[in-house]
Image (cartoon, grey):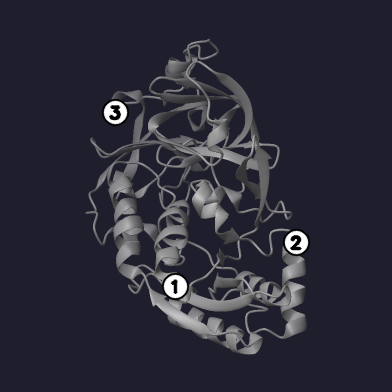
Amino acid sequence: MKKRVVIGLSGGVDSSVAAYLLKKEGYDVLAVYMVNWHDKTGLLKADCPWDEDVTFAELVAKKLDIPFHVVDLSKSYKKRVIDYMFSEYDLGRTPNPDVLCNREIKFDEFIKALEPFNADFVATGHYCQKSEINLGGKVYFQLLAGADKGKDQSYFLCQLNQKQLSKTLFPIGHLQKSEVREIARELKLASAEKKDSQGICFVGKVDLPTFLQQQLVAKEGDVIEIPKDSEIYAVNRENDNISEISLPWHYNRSSGIPTGKHKGAHFYTIGQRKGLNIGGKVEPLFIIATDVQENIIYVGQGQDHPGLFRPALFLKENELHWVRPDREMGLGETREYLVRIRYRQALQKASLIRVEKGMYIKFEEAQRGIAPGQFAAWYANNELIGSGVISS
């Protein structure tokens, strides 16, 4: 009897080819499109709303001769992803809705919604791979980077657990993006030339301040510029006190010079350049810190401004997650891993130090734009071992 697989068909080329490959391998394939967002507030004109995507998905399913269904998960998506996103920005943190979408929706609510279909597996068009390893008679599932290093999406799945991985297939993880496009062209799929989606998962590319103003109030505040040669950076951070070097740079109004106004500190994030609308500087301004309590944004000139760089960060104990639970670190233990703090960032050499309150990550080289609320994910070679929310 054929194994039944439900493919999350988004209308894009990746999930379309994934569906084709599953059918080619002999699975009993059903396609399901997830409707997760209806509101078009803040959407940029060039972005395609979901009602166009579902048309593409239906055309692909018809071409491949597989059953097509639609499920509406918009209530769960708003509660578990969007509301979380608003609350994080309100606190001055920078959430990653795509990671949350995968953990809370695609690999949780979506799987629950598929129970009537009696599927053996759920499949997606992510560029990542899965394997398994037997240790002492117990099987552990491995989340591996995609073969296409330029498209690897394992970071977005850094919060998945063993149960979720056991039921998931990644049909295109071994392919290059160019190969996926070529397969779609050969099959004459409607999605063959469709552009990749951008922006917030299932919402699209948005003007973030406009989108956030649905719940967060705009409030004018000061922009303070911090000079590169500020005395703040004269503090010796090449020491061994990990609890000190993992702290963000601290500023106040007297630390720099007023240089403009902003619309609300919670609309901005560390490392951001666009949206300040302040000219007349020798070098471009970048945000180096935000203070939502005082409603102040601190900026510095140039990509090499010292305020953009930090040697370490901290993850709270209750926000640590181990994709491979058998490799969880013990208290007082230190390990060397490769770490990334944002999608598509090159993996960075770092030491992970487990303490009672959580875990420190000390990088071999200082990292640019460490932002609380983002996820740090650590790898052993090409296997994602665990992840956590950056606290500071």
Q: Is residue 38 above or below residue 374?
A: below
Decide which of 240, 321 is in the foreground and name it: 321
Q: Is residue 128 visible?
A: yes
Q: Earlier in the sequence, mark 3 or mark 2?
A: 2
Residue that carries the numbered disc 1 in the rendered image: 34
Residue 321 image offset from top left, x and y in percent = 47, 38
Decide which of 231, 162 is in the foreground and name it: 162
In the picture, measured across the screen, residue 235 lies left or right of residue 298, that is: right
Residue drawn 50% across the image and 11% down it: 236
Decide which of 115, 50 is in the foreground and name it: 115
Residue drawn 22% across the image and 49% down it: 219
Residue 226 image offset from top left, x and y in percent = 42, 29
Q: Quadrant of residue 65?
A: bottom right
Residue that carries the numbered disc 3 in the rendered image: 253
The quadrant the C terminus occupies is top left
Q: Amino acid at mark 2?
A: Gln
Which of discs 3 and 2 lies nearer the camera? The answer is 2
